[in-house]
Each structure stands twice: as structure tokens, then as C-alpha cells.
Image: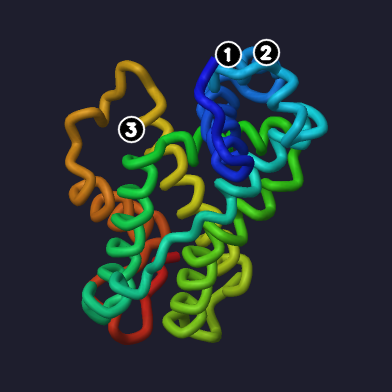
Amino acid sequence: MSSRLPGPQRRDSIVQAASGLFADRGYHGVSIDDIAREVDVSPAVIYRHFSSKKELYDTVLMELACQRESYVDAVINSGTSFEDVLAGMTRIYINSIAENPDLLRIELQSLLDGNSATREFFENRWKSFADYIEFSLNEMLPYEQANREVTILSASLMFQGILREALVQKFLQPHDRLEDVDLEELSVELVRLFLRGLGINKSRLTRKAVIKS
């Protein structure tokens, strides 16, 4: 058995071990006994801190979901264009997943499980992208643009989907075609493809964007 730790430290060690197991196997693929073995304690110790596996799982999800990147540096140092700032934000997000792929695994698990923490993942990890894209396009697109509101709302969803899928391919696939792709290059290329998908003429990003019909 592991050495005796103060209550808060033991709780943290349980959450950390459970996080890795839940990320790899999902809620139904992990038992309290599995977590106890990972921490090198008896199941009774786990139950001293958490009344059930569900409570522990929810704690793991909420703690990871509430991790939030700061995009202040991206806004200050990436230039003034929509493309440059979005690429800077994307680079920060990609780096956070590179450092801890469990963030992405757990988010995907919460989506599959229908857990309420999925909303927290959006609020704390995706909403900054959605807000920036929607605000910028609202400023850039001509007011007479057909289906303007739908375009703006769809665009933020489209970018989230592009980025999430690229990260799945980059970090969660064992034989990944993007394995040798530089993170800087990936962040820039994703933004370029996103703008191309919207039909935005990049040369006019500092003025009103042009959407090709």
C-alpha cells in the first residue's frame, strides 16, 4: 500500500489516477478496484473521499472541463487581423491538448455519456472561439448578406468541428497521418481552410469580408 497522505493530497491523487483511467476506457470501462490499484490503496480509501464511482467521475469531468486557456497573449501579440488572432488562439489550444491529451479524451467521453459536464467543456474550453468568431464575422460581413445570422452561427460550429477532428487525428490515433506536422503549421493551416470554407477573401479581412456566393 502507498504511504499515508493528508486527506486533500490523497483526494487529488485519486482524481489524477481516475482521470487517466476514465480518459482511456470511459466511465463503464473503469471500476473502483481499478482506481484503487492505480493509486495503491484499498477501495475503502476511495469511498472515504467519494460516495460512488459516479461522484468521482463527475468530479474528474468538472475539474478538467473548468481548465481554461488564456488567449490574452494571442490577442495582443498576433496582429490585428481576424486570421492572425484566430491562428494564435488555435495554437494555444493545440498546445494545451499536446501537453494533456486527456482533456480531449475526457471531453469526448462526456459527449458519448451525455454527462452534464459537456456544457462546462463548451463554456470553458470552446466558448472563447465561438464568441470571437461570431463577434468578428458580425463586424465583417455585409448586413445585406443572405442568411447572415445562420452563416455566423454555423461558422463557429464549423471551426470547432474542424479543430476537434484535427486534434483527434493528431493526438488520439496510434498511426496518425499528422504525426510529423508541426503544431504551428497545423494551427495556421486550419484557420486558412476555415476561411476558405467560408469563402472569405483574406486580402480584405481588415475591411468588410467578401463571401463568395
Q: Is residue 129 left or right of residue 29?
A: left
Give the mark nearer the N terminus: 1 vs 3: 1
Give the mark nearer the N terminus: 3 vs 2: 2
* Foreground of the two, 123 or 207: 123
Q: Marks 3 and 2, how far apart in space?
A: 32 Å
Residue for point 22% across, 78% down = 79
Instruction: Using a 10 Å C-alpha cutoff, classify the residue at mark 1 as few (fewer than 14 neighbours), some (14 to 19) or many (20 or more).
Output: some
Q: Secondary structure beneath disc 2?
A: helix
Residue 112 x, y percent position in the rendering: 68, 31
Q: Quadrant of the C terminus?
A: bottom left
Q: Which mark is residue 94?
A: none
Residue 210 x, y percent position in the rendering: 37, 75
Q: Which mark is residue 170?
A: 3
Residue for point 71% across, 34% down = 56
Q: Secondary structure beneath disc 3?
A: helix
Residue 34, above or below 105: above
Residue 198 x, y percent position in the rendering: 42, 61
Residue located farthest toward the right when viewing the structure as drawn:
51
Residue 96, above or below 52: below
Q: Is residue 160 left or right of residue 188?
A: right
* Residue identifier under label 1: 37
Instruction: Using a 10 Å C-alpha cutoff, classify the residue at mark 3 as few (fewer than 14 neighbours), some (14 to 19) or many (20 or more).
Output: many
* Foreground of the two, 105 or 185: 105
Residue for point 71% across, 40% down = 58
Disc 2 marks which amino acid? Asp
* Residue identifier under label 2: 33
* Foreground: disc 3 or disc 2: 2
